[in-house]
Amino acid sequence: MFNSSNKFRHTQVFCDVRRPCITLPGPRGIRRYEFKLHKSENEKECLNLIFIKKLLTQKGENDDFSIRRKCVYTFNALIANCWFKNKILLAGDAAHQTPPFAGQGMNSGLRDALNLSWKLAFAINSNNPTILNSYEQERKYHIAQMIKISLLMGRVLNPKNKFLGILTRLFFYFISYYKPAKDYIFQMRFKPIPSFNEGFLWKTNNKYENELIGQLFPQPMVDDFKGNQFLLDEILGNNFFIIIYSNLPEKFISNKLIKKFKTKNINILGITPEYINPAQTTFKIVRDASKTLYNYQYN
Ligand SMILES: Cc1cc2nc3c(=O)[nH]c(=O)nc-3n(C[C@H](O)[C@H](O)[C@H](O)COP(=O)(O)OP(=O)(O)OC[C@H]3O[C@@H](n4cnc5c(N)ncnc54)[C@H](O)[C@@H]3O)c2cc1C
C-alpha cells in the first residue's frame, strides 16, 4: 500500500490468535501487510476492498491509503531431492521453498546464484562439469536449516490458542528490557550462518584449521603500505586468493610459488596484524586495521 499512516521503520508482528499479522516498511512510503486468512474465507471476498480496509484500520491505518497490490498466497517448506541432472540445474524457489516468516526465500535464491554462477562459467570454460556437483552439497544444508528456522518462527508468530498468544506477547515484552536478548531476537542473530561441511573444500586433520574451513571469511578494514583504506572484499573482488596472515607474510612464500599460482589465476595477499606495518614486496600486503582477524583468532 502507498501512503501508510504507520511510520514505524521496522517490521511489526501481531501474534494475535484471531488473525496473526505482520507488517513491514518498503521503499518510497510503501508498506506491506500480511494477514492469516481463515479456512472459511474465500479468495474473492478477501480481495474485496471493504474487507481489506477493515483489516488495515483494525491495525491502526487511516483510510486514506491506496492499495498497490493485493493477493492471496500459500507457502511451502520444500527442498528438491536433486538439483543437478542432465545439464539441468535448479536454483531459487525451483530448488527450495521457504515459508516467508524469516524473509529468507529470495536471500537463499541469491546465495544459490552466487554459488552457482562462477562454477557454471568455470565448467563451461574448462569443459569440465565436475565442480558443479559441489553446488548442491554446499547449499542444501544451509537451506534446510533456514527452512527449519522459518517454520519455528511461523509457530511462534502464529500462536495456536489464546494462552500461547498471551505467553508469546509477554515473552517479547519482557525480552525488550534485556538488551542482549532483545538484540539477539530482533536482529535475528539466531539465523544460521552459511557454512560448508562438504563441497569444494579440503578439510585437514588440524581441529583449529577445520573450524575455519568452509566458513564465511571475516571482512576487516585494511590499510595498504601507503595508508589507503579498503574493505577486504574490495581487494579480493571475485578472484581466487591465497591469504597469508602473519607478521611477515613476505617470508612465507617464494617467488617461484607465487608465479606458479599466477598461472592458475590464483593471487596472493598478505595481511599483517594491526600492530605491524605492511611491507612492499612482490605481492600485495595490507594491515588488519580494524583488528578483525586478530579478534577472530582470539575469540
Ligand atoms: C508473501 C511472500 C513474502 C516473501 N517475502 C520475502 C522476503 O521478505 N525476503 C525474501 O528473501 N524472500 C521473500 N519471499 C520469497 C521470495 O519471493 C522468493 O523466494 C523469490 O521470489 C524466488 O525467486 P525465484 O527467482 O527463484 O522464483 P520466482 O520469483 O518464482 O521467479 C520464477 C520466474 O520464472 C517464470 N517462469 C516459470 N516457468 C517458466 C517457464 N516455463 N518459462 C519461462 N519463465 C517461467 C515465472 O513467471 C517467474 O517470473 C517471499 C515470498 C512470499 C510469497
Image: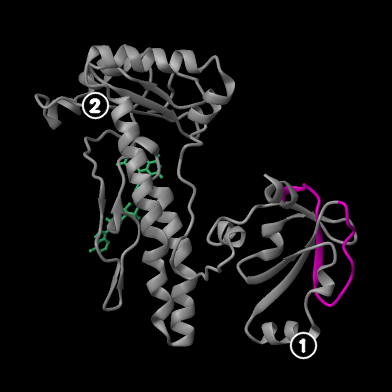
Nearer to us: label 2 or label 1:
1
Q: Where is residue 190 in the image (x, y as percent from the top left)?
A: 47, 37
Q: Mark 2 points at which residue?
A: 36
Q: In this view, does 60 lie to the left or right of 278?
A: left
Q: Position of residue 200 (x, y in %)?
A: 48, 71
220 versus 65 height, above or below: below
Helix or strand or loop: what does disc 1 sit on? helix
Disc 1, ligand 1: is the CB inside 8 Å?
no
Characterize the local packing of mark 1: few (<14), some (14-19) or many (20 or more) Cα atoms within 10 angstroms.
Answer: few
Q: Where is residue 29 in the image (x, y as percent from the top left)?
A: 48, 28
What's the residue at 44%, 23% (across, down)?
3
- What residue occupies the far left of the structure in this picture? 40
* Depth check, front residue: 198 or 92: 198
Q: Name the residue under label 1.
A: 256
Q: What stretch is highlighted in magenta?
A: 275-292
Residue 245 is a magenta residue: no
Is residue 61 in sight in this rendering? no
Are discs 2 and 1 less than 8 Å apart at CB? no
299 versus 171 height, above or below: below
Is residue 247 in sight in this rendering? yes
What kind of residue is marked 2? Lys
For the image, the number of numbered tags is 2
Q: Is residue 218 left or right of residue 167?
A: right
Q: Where is residue 72 in the image (x, y as percent from the top left)?
A: 21, 35
